[in-house]
């Protein structure tokens, strides 16, 4: 019998894991966003493709170089910033000047993520921080909407996209109001089917609710998303809207309109569910979703702006740590567990 | 009916691959004697035993070689007939040195086991049984190595109602309890008789997972009519074998935080421990060997073995054979088993198995995973069987805020099952953090 002479490694138990990894989760989210992105390019053409690509690349490069300049290893390999970039691009108007896209991306990743301490420490959804900055800095460009399925969307690059920094962008496409703006200012409600299928105007990736839901279902099935957050948002928005519509159908739209218009689907499925900026317990997630739903309805019905999903999520992000302080899991052998 | 509705399970938990198929069907075989057996005098929680043999003395297999030092201590017995070579410090699994008796077995000896003073289950008083169990050196063989006789005596003013026999064996790779239930079925019931009498309990529930249905059937079939035994099968889920999980799965009750099972009138005893009590006490013998599973992908002759206490891990692995790319060896199963840093440490009463991994299980792909920051994904919260917040605890541990971990987040309720670290996609060594934090908290509260 030969002597057992081996170099053995030691490690703390458990010695096995279920194989899950942050980069794998993040790559799956990217995968879930691909159909939405493809539809966005199909609906809005080259302009949307350029906005999406610029948004993604500027976010990735911002994170990469900030890491390098501060002497840390680059963290783009965890794929989180790729999601941020794509999501950020999906929330922008289709023909936004690219230099603005770059500025917002740099702000979101630099201020919204890097300064907070990077992955896992961002208090707010990074993509929405970038978008909120643009909304404040360039309110006109950020509310300039184009009709989808324009004839020349694959043949010519929209002039506004290539606008020189600082100059007033020139829009050559037919401009239009979003369904939410028309609801707010004209009390005209778009059809439910039109909204679900993405036939209306809006941000690059927010229009096709069905594809967004499919992406969300994929992530829920893979156990990579807490379904309670979007479901809680949907229930809250639908319930409040239904109550008001029953009360006054002339002024208030129906629940389906509210769920499928504007950024609600994209926000509820892909942004509110940002693990870092949402509560950790399931009951906390129900509360957090309800808060977002309530804020969305309040802003849309009675606020100064037609759309409120972005601010609703950012405000709920701010409240999330407090929800975690308030709601902790009930530890075994305490409270109602002891009879 | 209500029991059916509750499905005999607990909330949260995980489903690691079981890997029991390699050894579950293999009968228990006697393991050969190593050239030197190292019997640590502290293999249990509590005070080390006091040696009653001297260097150079001849001992007979089964003879008492160390007496318990007070109530929180148990006796030790000679695992082989031979000569006491030395009584000195030897390395233990925790890394610290433990006073140990080195016994060199006689190659020519028949290795007959010496009988002691029998303890008759019909006539002995509860206290006599408790003392007999202590003298037999019985500790929890499931891995905790808590002196069994100590928990049999309910605290002042407490009454025990139900005796749980734990045959869940939820750790992957391990099949010792499974084999013991199949092969020592009658010993299990004899052990139950002693335990019923010692504790004054009136009901018995044997708890198994549904990957051991053959054992459940055998137990049901062989159960004597006069014993109030109920065999319950739970779905496979880790850590079903933790006594707290057994109570919530089968009783629907939780042990109060910081309390004892006696607080809910229950007591839980591992099935192998029970079988040993049933086997040893009628002949007045002590624990000088135990059943372990030697398994894992790196082991050639995987199996269930009755192995002398004190057998060095090196000898056990050489006999069973390991492949060339063996990389990590641990005592017990992969979820809770401590890594072996020194192959010369001995098998003790608390060792339920030796599992060896190859570089395929521990290499670049799995063992040295990149650690990411916590992304708050809540998988650990969903896995923790005692409903802690491992994510928050992990962040506090990193910042060395140990007191807050204990006071605000119930750190001391963690029993280190490993479910949180198993599911963590950031590969944060949560259990390692918590072990250290618990140690620091004990240190701080002692100071």
Image (spheres, coloured by chain):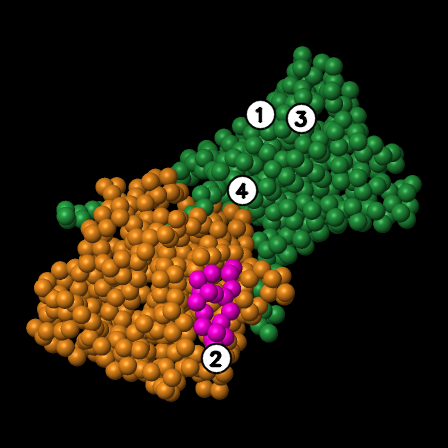
Q: Earlier in the sequence, mark 3 or mark 4?
A: 3
Q: Is residue B396 left or right of residue A109?
A: left
Residue B52 occupies quadrant: bottom left
Q: Nearer the viewer, residue A167 or A338?
A: A338
Give the distance between the C-alpha atoms of the residues marked 1 and 3, in whole angstroms: 12 Å
Q: Residue furthest left?
A: B56
Residue picked out by circle 2 = B201
Secondary structure under the numbered disc 4 in the rendered image: helix
Q: Colour of chain A?
A: green
- Residue B221 falls within the magenta-colored stretch: yes
Label 2: chain? B
Give the distance between the C-alpha atoms of the residues marked 2 and 3, in whole angstroms: 69 Å
Give the distance between the C-alpha atoms of the residues marked 1 and 2, in whole angstroms: 71 Å
Where residue B233 sits in the image (x, y, percent)? 51, 61
Q: Which mark is residue A53?
A: 1
Give the distance between the C-alpha atoms of the residues marked 3 and 4, in whole angstroms: 26 Å
Q: Nearer the viewer, residue B125 or A125?
A: B125
Q: Are marks 1 and 2 on the same chain?
A: no
Residue picked out by circle 4 = A113
Give the distance between the C-alpha atoms of the residues marked 2 and 4, in whole angstroms: 60 Å
Label 3: chain? A
């Amino acid at each position: 019998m030969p002597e057992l002479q081996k170099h053995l490694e030691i490690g703390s138990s458990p010695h096995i894991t279920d194989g899950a990894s942050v980069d794998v989760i993040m790559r799956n989210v990217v995968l879930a966003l691909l159909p939405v992105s493809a539809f966005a390019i199909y609906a809005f053409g080259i302009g949307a493709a350029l906005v999406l690509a610029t948004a993604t690349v500027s976010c990735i490069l911002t994170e990469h170089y900030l890491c390098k300049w501060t002497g840390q290893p680059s963290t783009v390999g965890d794929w989180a910033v790729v999601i941020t970039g794509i999501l950020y691009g999906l929330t922008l108007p289709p023909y936004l000047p690219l230099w603005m896209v770059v500025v917002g991306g740099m702000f979101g990743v630099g201020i919204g993520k890097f300064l907070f301490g990077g992955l896992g420490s961002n208090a707010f959804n990074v993509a929405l921080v970038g978008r909120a900055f643009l909304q404040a800095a360039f309110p006109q460009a950020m509310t300039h909407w184009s009709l989808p399925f324009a004839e020349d969307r694959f043949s010519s690059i929209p002039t506004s996209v290539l606008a020189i920094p600082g100059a007033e962008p020139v829009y050559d496409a037919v401009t239009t109001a979003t369904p939410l703006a028309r609801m707010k200012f004209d009390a005209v409600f778009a059809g439910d089917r039109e909204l679900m299928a993405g036939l209306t105007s809006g941000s690059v990736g927010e229009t096709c609710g069905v594809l967004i839901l499919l992406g969300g279902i994929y992530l829920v099935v893979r156990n990579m998303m807490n379904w309670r957050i979007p479901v809680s948002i949907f229930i809250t928005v639908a319930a409040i809207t239904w109550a008001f519509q029953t009360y006054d159908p002339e002024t208030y739209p129906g629940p389906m309109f509210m769920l499928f218009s504007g950024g609600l689907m994209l926000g509820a499925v892909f942004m509110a569910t940002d693990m870092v900026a949402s509560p950790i317990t399931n009951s906390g997630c129900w509360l957090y979703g309800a808060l977002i739903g309530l804020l969305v309805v309040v802003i849309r019905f009675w606020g100064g702006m037609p759309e409120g999903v972005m601010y609703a999520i950012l405000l709920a992000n701010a409240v999330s740590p407090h929800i975690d302080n308030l709601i902790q899991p009930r530890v075994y052998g305490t409270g109602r567990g002891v009879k | 009916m209500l029991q059916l509705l509750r499905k005999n399970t607990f909330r949260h938990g995980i489903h690691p691959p079981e890997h029991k198929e390699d050894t579950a069907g293999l009968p228990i075989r006697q393991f050969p004697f190593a050239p030197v057996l190292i019997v640590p005098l502290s293999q249990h929680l509590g005070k080390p035993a006091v040696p009653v043999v001297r260097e150079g003395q001849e001992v007979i297999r089964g003879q008492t070689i160390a007496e318990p030092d007070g109530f929180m201590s148990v006796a030790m017995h000679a695992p082989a007939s031979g000569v006491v070579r030395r009584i000195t410090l030897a390395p233990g699994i925790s890394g610290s040195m433990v006073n140990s008796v080195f016994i060199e077995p006689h190659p020519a000896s028949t290795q007959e086991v010496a009988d002691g003073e029998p303890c008759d289950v019909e006539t002995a008083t509860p206290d006599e049984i408790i003392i007999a169990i202590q003298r037999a050196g019985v500790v929890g063989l499931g891995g905790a190595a808590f002196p069994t006789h100590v928990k049999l005596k309910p605290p002042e003013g407490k009454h025990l109602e139900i005796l749980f026999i734990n045959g869940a064996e939820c750790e992957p790779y391990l099949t010792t309890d499974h084999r013991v239930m199949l092969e020592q079925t009658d010993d299990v019931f004899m052990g139950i008789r002693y335990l019923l009498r010692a504790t004054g309990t009136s009901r018995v529930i044997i708890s198994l997972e549904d990957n051991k249905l053959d054992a459940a059937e055998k137990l049901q079939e062989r159960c004597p009519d006069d014993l109030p035994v109920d065999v319950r099968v739970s779905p496979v889920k880790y850590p079903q074998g933790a006594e707290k999980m057994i109570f919530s799965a089968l009783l629907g009750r939780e042990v109060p935080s910081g309390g004892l099972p006696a607080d809910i009138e229950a007591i839980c005893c591992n099935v192998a421990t029970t079988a040993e009590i049933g086997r040893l006490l009628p002949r007045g013998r002590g624990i000088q060997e135990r059943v372990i599973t030697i398994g894992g992908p790196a082991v050639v002759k995987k199996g269930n073995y009755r192995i002398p206490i004190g057998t060095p891990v090196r000898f056990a692995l050489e006999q069973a054979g390991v492949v060339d790319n063996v990389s990590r060896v641990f005592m017990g199963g992969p979820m809770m088993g401590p890594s072996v840093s020194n192959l010369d440490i001995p098998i003790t009463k608390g060792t339920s198995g030796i599992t060896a991994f190859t570089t395929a299980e521990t290499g670049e792909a799995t063992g040295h995973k990149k650690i990411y920051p916590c992304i708050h994904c809540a998988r650990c919260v969903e896995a923790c069987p005692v409903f802690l917040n491992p994510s928050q605890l992990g962040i506090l541990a990193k910042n060395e805020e140990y007191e807050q971990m204990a006071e605000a987040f119930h750190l001391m309720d963690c029993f280190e099952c490993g479910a949180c670290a198993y599911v963590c996609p950031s590969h944060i060594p949560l259990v390692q953090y918590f072990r250290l934090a618990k140690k620091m908290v004990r240190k701080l509260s002692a100071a």
